[in-house]
Amino acid sequence: MLKPLAFALALLAGAASAQDRPVVATVNYPLAWMAERLGGDAVEVLFPVPEGRDPSFWRPGLSDIAAIQQADLIALNGAGFAAWTTRASLPRSRLVDTSAKLSDAFIATQSVTHSHGEDGAHSHTGTASYTWLDFELAAGQARALAAAMQRRMPDLSDQVAETLPALLADLDALDTQARETLATLQGTTIIATHPRYQYFARAYGLDIAALEWEAGAMPDEAQWQDLKDMMADTGASVLIWEAEPPREARDRAAELGLVSVIFAPLATRPASGDFASVMRAQIEALATRP
């Protein structure tokens, strides 16, 4: 049994060890998951977006920005994701835009303005930003993140080199699963409740028409009419929700003849599981819809 002084010293040593870990700050959950996979317990991953907030449009407070500025590496998604990063004073030497070398694959979007709860009004304009939903692009982002971690954290270079292949293998498995199991949906139109799925649709040969509904909220009558109009235009019979809707919303969609599938883009951390396990389940659910 440790004596009081020895116990206190052990606690201090443990705290010092935790503080000595390099910090990787990320703007979304996919990058946080990649950093956790690459660095394991040897790194601290900072993903400061509060639960229930949209990382795409979240605006950090001064304390959040101060914490991010102190990180050893700040991982950006690029493609216009997290616009606050273009206005905040962040140390350029510690930034990595994980999609910078993938810009030839970016998808241009039309400008649509609407609001998202506490995050206020915003526009979907310029570039589709959910790049990781094309799992080949996600693998490119993982490689860019790994290279930046090795450059900024040379003591972890060997570990990152050892963990990267397994991370890439998981992303390749998701890519293969999506290509093989979603082939039956090609040639038909799917409706999504939000314009998040451009890269997913292009990568896996899907036609996804998007509404502008608030995640997890009950649509109003005008939004239900938009859905009916879109169904009439496209003949769609599958509705993708980006978050679990109210029970009555599911029931009403079913009354319209739509099969509902929850397919979270995972910009935020899931309640259980991780990026790979949740994506596998969601792809399977979409492929085996009733």
Image (cartoon, rainbow, N blue to C red):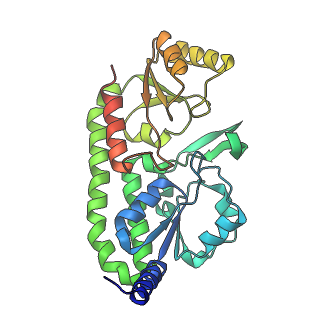
Would residue 272 be found to the left or right of residue 214 on screen?
left
- Which of these two is toward me, 12 or 188? 12
Image quadrant where one finds the N terminus: bottom left
**Residue 86, quarter of the rendered image:** bottom right
Position of residue 257 relative to residue 137, above or below, is above
Image quadrant where one finds the C terminus: top left
Would residue 80 be found to the left or right of residue 286 on screen?
right
Residue at horizontal 65 percent and vertical 65 percent from the top: 64
**Residue 141, quarter of the rendered image:** bottom left
Residue at horizontal 27 percent and vertical 33 percent from the top: 181
- Which of these two is toward me, 181 or 23? 23
User: Residue 38: percent from the left, percent from the top?
Assistant: 36, 67
Position of residue 153 relative to residue 121, above or below, is below
Would residue 189 be found to the left or right of residue 68 on screen?
left
User: Residue 280: percent from the left, percent from the top?
Assistant: 32, 41
Residue at horizontal 42 percent and vertical 73 percent from the top: 43
User: Residue 52: percent from the left, percent from the top?
Assistant: 58, 45
- Which of these two is toward me, 17 or 146? 17
Residue at horizontal 59 percent and vertical 51 percent from the top: 55
